[in-house]
Image: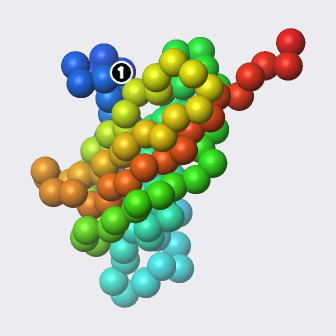
């Protein structure tokens, strides 16, 4: 997708990553060539990837199986830097995690994602 930076030790127990989608990003391909916008599915994918990355760092393989209460607040254009913030995965194999995507302190999208820890079949 693009370069991201992670901060797993956020004092509020959240996992964060930042990303900047350049104009040549595959997410813009065919999505309004004359007025490129980041599609909503890309923003949800960024939130899911942040949760999965969190799980990998903790040695807990996570899958995201759905979203609820999602609210899109504004459009995202090429070159804008996004901050993706997801609640830390608590103990247990399943959780609903709040997530937020912001740009310059403004909320882009927020909601809840359902994360499930994949148990190894060892």
Of residues 4 and 111, which is closer to you in this image? 111
Q: Position of residue 87 (x, y in %)?
A: 37, 33
Q: Residue under label 1, please give it.
A: 8
Residue at 30 percent of width and 17 percent of height: 9
Q: Is residue 78 visible?
A: no
Q: Position of residue 39 (x, y in %)?
A: 44, 70
- Would you say 72 lies left or right of 107 here? right
Task: Say few, some or many: other residues with alpha carbon within 10 Å of mark 1 (under 14 / 14 to 19 / 20 or more).
Answer: some
Q: Is residue 73 visible?
A: yes
Residue at 49 percent of width and 47 percent of height: 113
The image quarter containing residue 88 is top left
Element at badge 1?
A: loop
Q: Which residue is at the far bottom?
A: 34
The image quarter containing residue 97 is top left
Assign the C terminus to one quadrant of the image.
top right
The image's colour scheme reads: rainbow
Of residues 116 and 3, which is closer to you in this image? 116
Of residues 77 and 105, which is closer to you in this image? 105
Q: How many marks?
A: 1
Residue 61 drawn above or below residue 38? above
Residue at 43 percent of width and 83 percent of height: 33
Residue 100 drawn above or below residue 32? above
């Amino acid at each position: 997708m693009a370069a991201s930076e992670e901060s797993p030790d956020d004092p509020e127990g959240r996992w964060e990553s930042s990303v900047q989608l350049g104009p040549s990003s595959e997410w813009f391909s065919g999505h309004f060539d004359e007025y490129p916008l980041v599609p909503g599915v890309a923003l949800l994918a960024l939130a899911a990837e942040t949760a999965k990355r969190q799980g990998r760092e903790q040695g807990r393989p996570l899958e995201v199986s759905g979203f609820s209460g999602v609210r899109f607040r504004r459009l995202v254009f090429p070159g804008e830097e996004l901050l993706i913030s997801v609640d830390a995965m608590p103990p247990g194999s399943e959780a609903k995690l709040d997530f937020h995507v912001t740009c310059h302190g403004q909320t882009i999208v927020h909601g809840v994602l359902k994360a499930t820890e994949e148990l190894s079949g060892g």
